[in-house]
Image (cartoon, grey):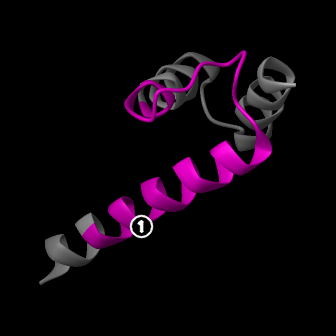
Amino acid sequence: MGTALLEMVILATGLPEGEIRRELQTLMAQHGKTAETLTTEDLREIMAEYLQDVLLAAKERHN
């Protein structure tokens, strides 16, 4: 399921596939996951942390 899930997310973003693929692979590696082992819950946790980091960085830039 992991590989199919990852591909679905990559295509759904509408972002350049190569760039988003690299970003997601980096995030997965930081969490000890691979495309083959990724579950929906893993992806949810990884993306929640990523979004929190992005929002915090954006807030800090505006202060």
Give residue 45's quadrant in the image. bottom right
Crowd tier of the residue under label 1, counting other residues whose Cα lies within 10 Å: few below 14, some 14–19, many 20 or above: few
Viewer-nearest residue: 31 or 8: 31
Magenta residue check for 46: yes
Question: Which secondary structure type mostly characterizes the magenta part of the structure?
Answer: helix
Kindly identify the residue that appears in the image at 41 percent across and 67 percent down.
Answer: 52
Specify the amino acid type for callout 1. Answer: Gln
Q: Quadrant of the N terminus?
A: top right
* Magenta span: 27-56
Looking at the rendered structure, the secondary structure element under dot 1 is helix
Residue found at the far bottom of this picture: 63
Q: State the image coordinates of residue 2 (x, y, percent, origin top left).
A: 78, 25
The C terminus: image quadrant: bottom left
| Magenta stretch: includes residue 29 | yes
The residue drawn where x is 45% and y is 35% is 31
50 or 59: nearer the viewer: 50
Indicate the position of residue 37 as horizontal and vertical percent values.
Answer: 70, 22
Q: Quadrant of residue 6?
A: top right
